[in-house]
Image (cartoon, rainbow, N blue to C red):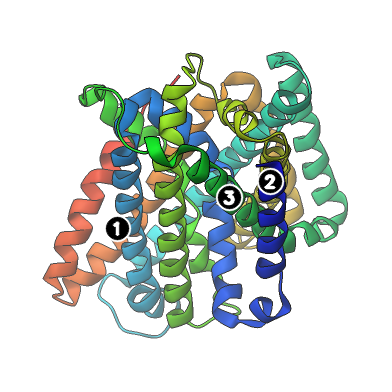
Amino acid sequence: MDALTLITFFICLSIFLSPHLERNRLWRATLTPLASIIGSGYLVSAPLLYYTLGSYAFLGMLLIVTFAYLIGGAIRYNILKAEGIIYGDEDFKHKELLREMETFSNLSLSFAYMVSVAFYLRLLSSFIFSGFFERNNLYENLLTTFILAFVGVSGYLKGLSFLEFLERYAVGIKLSVIVSFFLALLLYNYPYVGFFQSPKGVNFETLRVLAGILLIVQGFETSKYLYQEYSPEERVRSMKLAQIFSALIYLSFIVTVTPLFYRLKIVKLDETSIIFVASSLSLILKYLIILGSLMSQFSAGVADTIGSGGLIEEETRGKVSSKLGYLLTSVVGIVLVWSANIFEIITYASKAFAFYYLLQGVIALTVSLSKREYKNSLTFSLTLLGLSFVVLFGESAE
């Protein structure tokens, strides 16, 4: 299993980092949302959903990725129909109102990025200690604080360009690790794939927990902000591709890993339980999982710091520089790390992103109603109801 895992990893890495794939324009446009969606969320989602739904964790993931695709539909609609109104010369009765909502939604996204940076880097520390040391909450918080301070101060003093080279390799490494892990799970576990125990009862509290982990499939909205390099049609296609590809990864992973939680009789579930599962399959796989998670968490944290700083500068019209925005993002992250645990941070971030999506949904609904596209209006209305539930009732799985 060690040899097979390692060979699979390097074959996949050579494919995902190949010059031919890198030259593909659609793939390059897809990398940004895909990198954001597939951080280590797929690793955290497994213990979370198993804890919440037992053997029916797959159905919970199916609900989450389907709902995320509907949210993406509202943002894709805004790319094609609303951007021309908000930023262009197209005449519209409520144009100023749409502009104000767009500004407010961007500021909400900036705050959401601040929360997600804390989540990404706190998770990075958890994986370091799970892989190489004994778990210690104090030391993990101190390490996260150091990393946040390093990113913030470096961004304030020099900008973050010297860290950006990590972004090029992050997706390739993550996808290679995922394929290797999936193959090992499939070979080891295929006779047992299925439902092994009575599912836990689904009630209002279950739905609240599911609403609280929307963050794990967040990131597709980044396609909206690639307008300097890609056309609206290209951005829409990149978002669809990233969401479909990531959904297949999440669903396949949940199906193959859930039986192992039951078979290994794992009682204590936390954000790094997956390392124990990986080490039971292969020693090499354990360290590949750690490597992939460290790379993805650090690069995702840096990416969201850059995004937050850029949005702050844009929406304050330069009154607050992006460099100061980087520092502010890190300060907020440090406060969160010391005031909330990892699952609470997931919930806060989910609510923050849900509020951003809510505002984008209102924009889509307003434009679709004005254009008398009532089928779209009905879909957006149902999506807004779901997002309202996430904002109001999303709960930590802790």
Q: Quadrant of the C terminus?
A: top left
Q: Position of residue 18 (x, y in %)?
A: 71, 74
Label 1 sits on residue: 70
| Coordinates of residue 166 in the picture (x, y in percent) | 77, 57
Depth check, mark 1 against mark 3: the one in front is: 3
Q: Is residue 128 above or below residue 386?
A: above
- Are circles 1 and 3 on residues that touch, CB within 8 Å? no
Where is mark 3, residue-wise?
Answer: 178
Q: Residue at x 56, y 21 (%)?
A: 340
Q: Earlier in the sequence, mark 2 or mark 3?
A: 3
Residue at the spot 35% in from the left edge and 50% down from the top edge:
65
Name the foreground residue: 79 vs 32. 32
Which quadrant of the structure image shows residue 51? Answer: top left
Q: Amino acid at mark 2?
A: Gly
Count up the numbered dots. Answer: 3
Type of amino acid at the residue the image marks with label 1: Leu
- Out of 52 and 153, give the one closest to the viewer: 52
- Residue at image position (67%, 82%) is 23
**Disc number placed over residue 292 in the picture, else none:** 2
